[in-house]
Image (cartoon, rainbow, N blue to C red):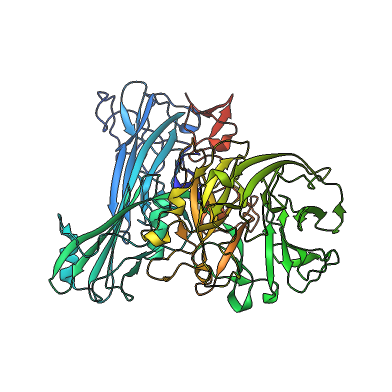
Amino acid sequence: MMRHSIRALLFGSVMVAAAIAAACGSSSDSTFGEGAGDGGDESTGPQPCVTGFGGGCSDGGGNGEGGILTVTALAFDPPTTTLTLDGINPGLAKYTLKATFPNGTTGIVTAQSLQFDRPDVATLVPGSPVGLNAAGQFAGTGTLHGVYGGREATATLTVLVHAKSVMSGVDPAAVIGLDAAGLGADTKVTSLLYPYDLTVFPLGLASPLLMWTAPNTTDTYKIHVEEKNYTFDTYAVPAKSGQLRMDQTMWDRVTASNTGDPLKVMLSRWDSASKTAFASAAESWTVAPASLRGAIYYWTTSTGGHMSRIRPGTGALPEQLNGGKCMGCHAVSADGTTLVAAVEGEGSTDNGDQRGWVSYDLPDASIRKEPHLFGGNVAVNPNGKYTVFGTTPLRIADTVTGVENMDAGLAIALDPGMNTLAHPAFSPDGKKFAAVQSSNNWYTWQASKLMVFAFDEKSQTFSGAAPLAASADFGVGQQAIAYPSFSPDSAFLAFHVGDHASGCSTSCDNNETGISAIYLQPSAGGASVRLANLTDSPPNVADKNLAFEPTFNPIERGGYFWVVFTSMRDWGNEITGTANNGKKRLWVGAINKASGGMDPSHPAFYLEGQEETTTNMRGFWALAACTQTPKAGAGGGTCAAGFECCSGFCDKGSCVDTGMLACAGLGGSCKVAADCCNSDIVVCSNGMCKANGPK
């Protein structure tokens, strides 16, 4: 699939069949004059029998079936058009369809069928000339296809959008000054606190909150956002000093219009005292052509400590689970159907601990099974049928019946000096399993080793335990390998390495702190790579090396692997202070699919919508069910954006199937007629799009 964010939005097909006259007559007010013509004058030559042009036909070019003339060539005039719009007012591009006939003469014809492959960019207006009406909301390039007499013509429309928003209270002189060329460098604002340079953002999120250290509270700022076909400028005196957010509607349009080129972001400042404009900070971001549609389940200290769920996206708010009951260790199946969590006071018959595990059906979080077995160290296999739990040795049980397999193969001989096996995780393909050997309890261990097993779901057994990373590989103070998570392709494991497994060594209260970095290692063995871009991107030196508990989204989205992790770092100037457990929040970062021994990660972004005043940690992804494309004539399938649809395409509020990003022209490859442009009169024959009618 081409690197194109519009494919995740408003991309359907527009088919228009033009009315064709079945018979011709003679008239003195014909659009075309009489006579043979000289082959280059459009005012002479044979007259195509097309409604709206008057009568008087000659068949000097040869009439085909249904009054359609035989043509030797077909073209739109002009072949390409560019509209530059302001994001508010629409624009109209017109195209005339011209045919060349067998005797060399030319004339204007009306297409039998028309299709424009970017209805998000412009609406097709059939007729002669053909119109493409661009609302100016989205930028991009689309292709107009027209068929007449067995021939096809194409033309392109490129829509450029240069939009501007001046907020109330902005001095007009500030706008003029900030728009001037060659601004001097700002010595007082030189960089952003957040977001970080080179961040990868998915679609569908709240527009990023830009934050910086502001020298004055009355200065005016300009945010300039620029990509290949779209620019947007915001001018404002921030309501909160050093913070400014781009308009959400414009952010959605800019990101939807992105074609894979860098999204350049520039901050400029108008000093209210000196009446001078400065170029302050500049960054470059990447827009991934997909959303993180779904939910993240995590533990929070809000209202005493419970499980919450957040659905990443605009306006996201945390949802409290299980009535706010205290729940701790937890895991979610890769298919998003099952949550298993240790519940305080649930009780266990195996060791008397009061934190027994309970399985829940998602998304309603209704109880599936309460087996009253100790729920420390839980993991769930991809389809949610089985959970691993307990202390050494780890055990496995059915999440529906609670029945254990007493001979699962997890009672392995631990290495000398190791006394526990903890932090289990299944791979998304269901064939691998990881856990960590350690030399002490779950939060104070002093040495550790990552292990990988083979898992057979049919027999519920584990085998072939093999070591991967060991704490000795990471140097003094980095002895705790913890919380492994498999990448979507099951080929890699992310894990954190810190001074302690949980970021604390004794009480784990809000004032305790720790250090940790996230690493990536092939699950088949090989060298591990520190994800420095993910771990060390904060501008504040004190915020580096504070990345814990990584968990992968179980599927690749937009060409990236996505990991949610816990960090004690500042969120710009909104969440600040000493790095400790009380400041742990959820962050998300993109990771390239192939590392090649290099750091494949990108700087992370803060997950907006989570509780902002309490500790939040240990996020798990659950996939969202996509919206199916309705059958012809059936209701349903409503959508606001393409990423909500199973097909990936949303047109005029309904999910649609296009099969391809753009239709195939005549002579293009196809599997079915729907793959072809103008499929109402074009067929797919022997894998090629062919027109019905004269050739």
- Whether residue 618 can be seen here: yes
- Whether residue 13 can be seen here: no
Identify the residue at horizontal 80%, vertical 48% (top origin).
411
Q: Quadrant of residue 371?
A: bottom right
Number of callouts: 0
Q: Is residue 181 left or right of residue 124?
A: left
Question: Residue 562: percent from the left, percent from the top?
Answer: 53, 50
Q: Is residue 41 left or right of residue 286?
A: left
Nearer to the camera, 42 or 268:
268
Q: Is residue 48 left or right of residue 8?
A: left
Question: Residue 418: percent from the left, percent from the top?
Answer: 69, 50
Measured along the vertical axis of the image, is residue 507 above or below residue 377? below
Measured along the vertical axis of the image, is residue 238 above or below residue 252? below
Measured along the vertical axis of the image, is residue 290 above or below residue 363? above
Q: Is residue 361 left or right of residue 316?
A: right
Question: Residue 134: percent from the left, percent from the top?
Answer: 36, 53
Identify the residue at horizontal 87%, vertical 50% (top origin).
406
Nearer to the camera, 551 or 542:
542
Nearer to the camera, 345 or 380:
345
Q: Quadrant of residue 69?
A: top left
Question: Residue 589: percent from the left, percent from the top?
Answer: 49, 53
- Residue extending farthest to the bottom is 303
